[in-house]
Amino acid sequence: MPQTETPGTEVALRPRPRWWTELPLILLVYGCYSAGRLLARGDVSGAVDHGLALLRIEKALHLNAEHPLNRLFTREPWLGVPADFWYASLHYLVTPAVLVWLFRARAPHYRAARTWLLASTFIGLIGFTLLPTCPPRLLDAGYGFVDTMAQYSSYGWWGGEASAPRGMGGMTNQYAAMPSLHVGWALWCGVLLWRHGGTRLTKVLGVVYPLVTAIVVMGTANHYLLDAVAGVAVMGVGYLLAPPLMRAADRLRARLSRPAAPVASRTGSPIVSAGCQTSAGERIPRQRDSRRGPAPGPDAPVTDAGEGAATPAR
């Protein structure tokens, strides 16, 4: 987990995050991600070319996990239907649930985890923009893939256009397959559950959740194997970027919260220059002595000696 704190100084350096500042930040970033993902549709023919290029690379590397998984999910509804529900919903539920759990129960680790997630999400958005990719389910039927979400659409809320609700397929970018943030976010959840869960069950979930998610995205023909690999790589880059991003945010926060230099008052200050002291109403040192006249001599009357002088004996 990325850490920037000096051991033993976390509490002194940084207060606990507040939900009323964290929630708008998360919503803003997710809104930017959704809007960018929607706008970065790219050219359809180019997206198809990118998808076929991935298939050629996998064939050259003798990788073909998508076809057998997709045939299995297509042939066995008891596997295909739960997989479609998994794909359509869990990344929207588990990821924020883990984030909230960290905020409430593992606060010292929350900020680094949140920064890691947001940095990786922005990197994924760059990937969608620069490399629009047609998922296997949208390729010509001759390539051997079946869209299980279209096949089992009567079981769920989705239609034939990805995991979007029926009638809202036009509001999503179906060519944002590279990288797979389904896999990336699941890996993020798994790492945090493994490291900070504290029980055997959470460690098991930390392993099972990202592995099953990778199987699901390929079996439902929503992603290629290389999409899943790219999702893991994106999370790795985000992990490395999180510490410098937090340091930069700390420097910016310190600069913005630095108090202004105090301005000297023009009145009421007893100091004039060179450390000389004056009392109120004096403009120059020793002004009091000049107003009183010359110092009393040895023959001065006893009344000049002040109230505290002793009266001479007669």
Image (cartoon, helix red, strand yellow):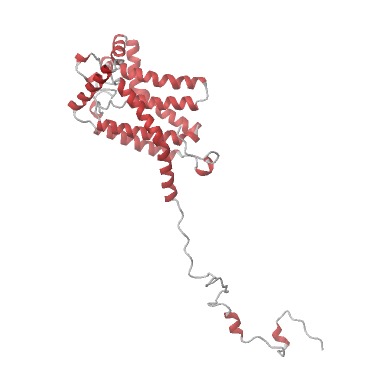
Q: Is residue 83 above or below residue 47?
A: above
Residue 100 location, quadrant: top left
The residue positioned 39% from the left and 25% from the top of the image is 186
Residue lying furthest bottom: 299
Q: Nearer the viewer, residue 282 or 157?
A: 282
Residue lying furthest right: 314
Residue 262 position, x and y percent, is: 48, 61
Residue 309 location, quadrant: bottom right
287 left or right of 79?
right
Q: Nearer the viewer, residue 163 or 251?
A: 251
The residue positioned 55% from the left and 39% from the top of the image is 8
Q: Is residue 170 above or below residue 65?
A: below
12 left or right of 93?
right
Q: Is residue 122 above or below residue 279?
A: above
Residue 208 position, x and y percent, is: 42, 19
Residue 295 position, x and y percent, is: 65, 85
Quadrant in which the C terminus is drawn: bottom right
Residue 107 position, x and y percent, is: 49, 35
The residue positioned 44% from the left and 50% from the top of the image is 257
Residue 207 location, quadrant: top left
The residue positioned 34% from the left and 26% from the top of the image is 231
Q: Nearer the viewer, residue 175 or 91?
A: 175
